[in-house]
Image (cartoon, helix red, strand yellow):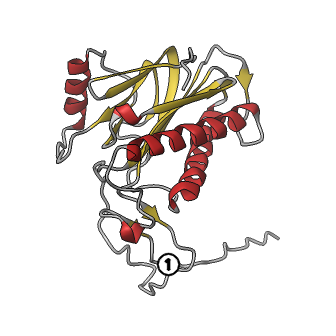
């Protein structure tokens, strides 16, 4: 594996991965998600048995312990940062940590016939287990607001395709994505899979997720679960939703 000098430089220390680039605008699906401008984003590994609920205080403690400045979007994972992998193509750099002890399957022909109105469980934010697929993507291009948001969908699609090929499931119960761009870079109005940014993102996510997954299981006494049913913390969406046709408004 060759060392490179990516535009979004990363360093890991004390279970924390910092991805840095000055004045980056980030968009995150993590616990402190949304848009913000910061010089860095973080991916933090939590220990076995972790049960903290004061997430902001916990993250601040971990960053201080690792000698990093607070601020910037932060993701939490049960995967060790030693298993983090990065990939770069063109204007895009991506980093990933990947484990699938808590896979989330989506069968296309579920057998459950429960009422579509019954959610089948309580809502809530799941804490990261020993799985989770976290992705940080950065581009040196300046993306339009919609293009930055769409980059999350592009990264998530590439992650799902990679995991389906590697493990047979599209994700886990706690996956998260952070995307960033350089507001001073060359403008890009779109980021779909047919654009340079989208194509590069798909390739980077595929390589980073696949490499991290292989690293995560290389020194373990287990292989990735072959299905959600085989996993300790696996879930499967076996309920059905009610399909309907939108009303037609016939104006006179």
Circle 1 crowding by C-alpha within 10 Å: few under 14, some 14–19, many from 20: some
* Residue lying farthest to the right in this orientation: 252
Q: Quadrant of residue 191?
A: top right
Q: Is residue 120 above or below residue 188?
A: below
Name the spot of residue 50 as percent of width and height, x first.
18, 44
Per the image, label 1 sits on a secondary structure element best described as loop
Residue located at (52% from left, 23% from top): 25
Above or below for 37 versus 173: above
Residue found farthest to the bottom? 113
Q: Count up the numbered dots.
A: 1
The quadrant of the picture occupied by the N terminus is top right
User: What residue is rendered at 67% in x and 23% in y?
Assistant: 91
Q: Is residue 111 rendered to the left or right of residue 219?
A: right
Q: Residue at x 50, y 80 (%)?
A: 110
Residue 95 pos. (x, y %): 50, 32
User: Front-most of 30 and 138?
Assistant: 138
Residue 111 locus on image (x, y percent): 48, 85
| Left or right placement of residue 89 versus residue 137 in this view | right
Question: Observer-nearest residue: 202 or 251?
Answer: 202
Depicted 222 relative to depicted 121: above or below: above
Question: In the image, what residue occupies the spot 42% across and 84% down?
Answer: 115
Q: Quadrant of the C terminus?
A: bottom right
**Residue 108: % across, % down:** 57, 74
Left or right, residue 242 beside residue 98: right
User: Residue under circle 1?
Assistant: 240
Q: Is residue 159 left or right of residue 216?
A: right
């Amino acid at each position: 594996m060759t060392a490179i000098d990516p535009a979004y430089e990363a360093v890991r220390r004390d279970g924390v991965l910092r991805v840095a680039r000055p004045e980056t605008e980030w968009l995150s699906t993590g616990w402190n998600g949304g848009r913000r401008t910061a010089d860095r984003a973080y991916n933090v590994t939590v220990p076995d048995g972790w049960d903290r609920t004061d997430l902001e205080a916990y993250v601040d403690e971990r960053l201080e312990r690792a000698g990093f400045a607070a601020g910037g979007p932060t993701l939490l994972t049960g995967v060790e940062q030693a298993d983090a992998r990065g990939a770069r193509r063109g204007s895009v750099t991506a980093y990933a940590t990947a484990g699938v002890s808590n896979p989330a399957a989506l069968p296309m022909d579920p057998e459950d016939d429960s009422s579509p109105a019954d959610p089948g469980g309580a809502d809530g934010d799941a804490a990261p287990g020993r799985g989770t697929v976290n992705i940080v993507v950065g581009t040196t291009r300046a993306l339009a607001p919609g293009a930055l948001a769409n980059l999350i969908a592009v990264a998530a699609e590439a992650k799902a395709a990679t995991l389906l090929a590697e493990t047979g499931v599209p994700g886990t119960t706690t996956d998260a994505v952070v995307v960033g761009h350089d507001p001073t870079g060359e403008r890009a109005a779109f980021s779909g899979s047919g654009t340079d940014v989208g194509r590069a993102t798909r390739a980077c996510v595929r390589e980073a997720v696949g490499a991290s997954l292989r690293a995560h299981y290389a020194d373990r006494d287990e292989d990735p679960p072959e299905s959600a049913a085989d996993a300790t913390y696996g879930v499967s969406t076996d309920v059905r939703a009610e399909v309907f046709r939108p009303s037609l408004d016939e104006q006179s």
